[in-house]
Image: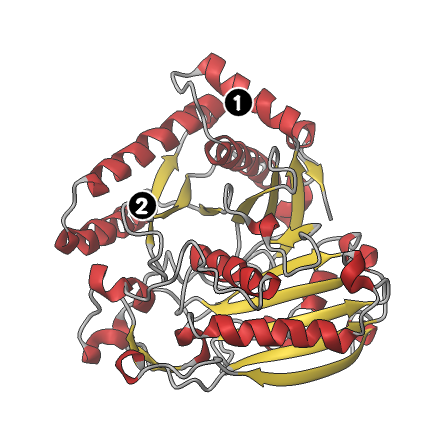
Amino acid sequence: MSSVSRLVSSVCKKIIKPYSPTPISLRCHKLSYLDQMVGGIYLPLALFYPKLSNTWSNKPNNVVSQHLEKSLSKVLTNYYPFAGKLNDNISIDCNDSGVEFFITKINCPMSEIFNHPYFEKHNLVYPTEVINNQYTYEGSLAVFQLTHFSCGGIAISMCLSHKVGDGYTFGNFMNHWATIARNPLSSEIYPISPKFDGSFYFPPTKDEDSSNVSNNNIVPQREECVSKGFSISSSKLTALKARVINESKVQNPSDTEVVSAFLYQRAMATKKLVNSSSIRPSLLHQAVNLRPPLPKHTMGNIGCLFSILTKEEKEMDLAQVVSKLRKEKEEVKQKYKNAKIEELLPITLEQYRKANDLLVNNSCYDLYRFSSLITFPSYDVDFGWGKPEKVISPLSTSNPPIKNMFVLMDDKNRDGVNLTCSMKKQDMLAFERDEELLQFASPTS
């Protein structure tokens, strides 16, 4: 047993089933083509509440747990595929078998988790079996854990099979769950009531071909890497944007564009130092949410990606990278703007083929993946005892982490950006010491 795992003093497991049975008409949830493409990795998300509100601070741990369990049961009625069983790569049998819910106690204050280098101790707030077997776990499609710290704070984590949904689905679920928890007796309708109709927009392949549907860009290879967190304050973000505006034709660069371009630039620059060579041909993959043009209530994997290629050192200029990102994004938006439903899948698959061709045809050495949850209300998830002090984003705690993966989120005040990144250890050692990176980004772990 590791010194980290010794901090866990108790673990209790329960099965939570939907409050109302799933109608027979909804029992078979067909996976969409995009659901079939993604790997079965579990996406982790954790919310930290260092101090509960006065109403809750003196209540026993079991009362907090019951509050979460009851509201979870109710919200699963709306998110019924989460409580089902995967049928190969074809469908989900929405049989209301339930989701796993773990309750643990950790013998340390929450601050000790936050102050630990890299992310090893963060994994304590996730179900151990899931976090250690994220690609092969055979339990429920959604797994939850309530963690009590010695300081009185709690963490609530969830691991969701990528087969069921993407980051948007994840975030919408957490906010829906919290809304029900805050208002257990209210008949209030959540603003974005979910529909699991992705297969209508992205029809699945024939049953006999489903096991062959995959994409190397979506199912990355596993490598030994480390993860670290950084933050970019509002003033530093403004300074980066000003640089882009002064040196390019992009006059309203978004947080995602500027931060992605900056991190990509610094990662390439430090990689060059590690290898004592000229710049290596590199590719930036940016995941894009397709809601809109698709309805906001459509759950599942509803997205595509676009890519930019960098082959020469002169292309590493920050303003130039942002300009290329903006150009690609606008081209993607234009393709979907007036697309008919039957055109959505061909357009999306073409985006993946285009990215793959860039990777293969240019002998790219390095692929950098970016996913942004900026503007999504992760810090609004209030179960009744206040909003989280810290949110740890999906994929940053994968075991092992995905190489060259960057996840961007708003900070608690919504004016800066928190980010997590994973790299090979020698690359991270150079990256985290990069002087230009540290002029704008501060380590958070």
Q: Kindly identify the residue that appears in the image at 47 percent across and 76 percent down.
A: 141
Where does label 2 land, which residue?
292
Q: State the image coordinates of residue 120 (x, y, percent, origin top left).
A: 71, 62
- The label shown at residue 241 is 1
- The label shown at residue 216 is none
Secondary structure, mark 2, is: loop
Q: Residues within 10 Å of mark 1 (few under 14, many from 20)?
A: many
Q: Amino acid at mark 2?
A: Pro
Of 77 and 139, the residue lying toward us: 77
- Whichever of callouts 1 and 2 sits on the residue coming sooner in the sequence is 1
Q: State the image coordinates of residue 171 (x, y, percent, origin top left).
A: 50, 56
The quadrant of the picture occupied by the N terminus is: bottom right
Of 168 and 224, the residue lying toward us: 168
Q: CA distance from mark 1 to mark 2?
A: 26 Å
The correct choice, above or below, for 211 with respect to 288 in the image is: below
Q: State the image coordinates of residue 376 (x, y, percent, origin top left).
A: 50, 46
Drawn side of residue 342 relative to residue 414, left or right? left
Q: Quadrant of residue 185?
A: bottom right
The correct choice, above or below, for 255 with respect to 106 in the image is: above
Q: Kindly identify the residue that appears in the image at 37 percent across and 56 percent down.
A: 217
Of 129 and 384, the residue lying toward us: 384
Q: Amino acid at mark 1?
A: Lys
Drawn side of residue 314 relative to residue 149, left or right? left
Q: Kindly identify the residue that appears in the image at 22 percent across and 59 percent down.
A: 201
